[in-house]
Amino acid sequence: MIPTTSTATKRPYYGTTTLCPFCSRLLPGEVFGRDAAVYLSRECPEHGHIEALVCSDIDWFEGLKRFDVAPIKPAHPQHSVNLGCPLDCGLCAAHRQVAGTMAIEISNRCNADCPVCLGDNRGTFEMSVAEIRELVEGAIRDQGQIGVLTLSGGEPTIHPQFFEILALLDRPEIGRINLNSNGRRMVQDAKFVDQLRQHPKVYVSLHFDGRNAEKIRGTRPELQEQALDRLCEAGIGVVPLILGVRDINDRELGTLVPALLQRSKAIKTVIVSLMAYMGANGSRFKPEPLRRLTIPDAVDSIAAGSGTVIHRDDFIPVPMPNPICAAIGYFFVDDEGLIPMIRAAGVDQTVACIQNQHFAQANEKMEAFFREMINNVYANPRKFPDADRTLRRLRTFVERLFAGNRQSAAERQALAEESIKTVFIMQFMDGWTFDTQRLSKCSCQHLLPGDRRVPSCGYYAFHRQRDARFA
């Protein structure tokens, strides 16, 4: 049966190009509102009328315009516009946003078989150091700086030249290296963790999914806990990566997220990536296109489960990509607990601080951001619980971080990241929600052989099926 929504009156928003989730045919699509939610529809000549939920809260969707900041267009597109998105990708001249994060799937071998795997781990390739060097040098030549470079797969830690690859990436043009891992190597190989400590730019995006992790990753939660403890004890930067799945762990988000933020100074960010029905196993995981977990649902789950600690307005859409793709919350964390920073600073000041970047930098903009928070709390003490204590904590931090020139830029950034923590909620597109209007502003981009760079959702949902390395 092809899912559809009710027959209530449509509120059309825009037309786009989408996919049939069954046969991957490119089709005209329409994004529209109905009742309290937003959907994407299309007509497939083989599979008929298909609709999927895009956003469960129409007010959230209609408020996205405020966060759709002017993008920074790539300076060196690789292709002209000919057949249209996504067929011209590489990037083509119509792409509107530079990359905040670039990713390389360094192999499609894995030491796990996750029930919801979004990858396609056929064990058919491992990229050489020379191939990776060529991709990275091409990206640096085109864009100058890479804020975050993600190594994924497959399971990147089992690549036989893994540490040679890390050494290659230790260059000033790359801000940080994000290692997407299931954590098994960290648990099984203490020497590996010791070697990883020698690469301070590396942050490990560690799969960490709560009590029902085995239903999601096929991995016992005890193993994920053990991997997290190993990394934190070693002082390696960790980004717990929760895959949020409706009816499995969505109601646990409100306890998981604040606990992780306060668990260790080694934890820099918490990412909640919402279930996308694609990849070798994800495409077979029971799809619920009209009940899928969307960003407003995840925000509400975090707020409801955290008690009074986190509110819905502590999150805003991320203003670098298309703002429907991600939301972010900023939290100041010290030994006395959490202070939600967006609530204290205000939305406009937050957007001004972080627009066109995925991570805040410890610079003059951040100092102004903190001083705005201090001014707001001082001027409106009734709005903030325990305002005097909050002011003391914020002032102490600003003096420590910005007074004088005692620290280098790197030391200041490291100090900032111990106390300024982010929660990202990300919604990747799949065949049900694929939308080239969203794709054209994607700031997460995959580096592919042949000096190609494609938006990550375009790669996962469309281009990987046409990647000869997976044949």
Image (cartoon, helix red, strand yellow):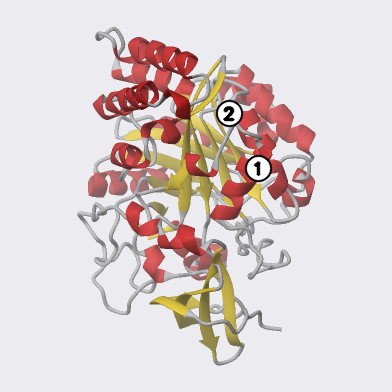
Question: What secondary structure is marked by label 1?
Answer: helix
**Label 1 vs label 2: CA separation?**
17 Å
| First in sequence: mark 1 vs mark 2 | 2
Q: Which residue is mark 1?
A: 304
Neighbour tally class for label 2: few under 14, some 14-19, many 20 plus, Cα within 10 Å: many
Disc 1 residue type? Ala
Q: Which residue is mark 2?
A: 261
Image spot of residue 219 (x, y percent): 76, 43
| Residue 191 occupies quadrant | top right
Q: Residue at x 53, y 44 (%)?
A: 312
140 lies left or right of 199: left
Query: In the rendered image of this protein, does residue 309 appear above or below residue 127?
Result: above
140 lies left or right of 426: left
Q: Of residues 44 and 156, which is closer to you in this image? A: 44
Image spot of residue 37 (x, y percent): 55, 68
Q: Residue at x 41, y 30 (%)?
A: 344
Q: Residue at x 23, y 56 (%)?
A: 73
Image spot of residue 107 (x, y percent): 55, 50
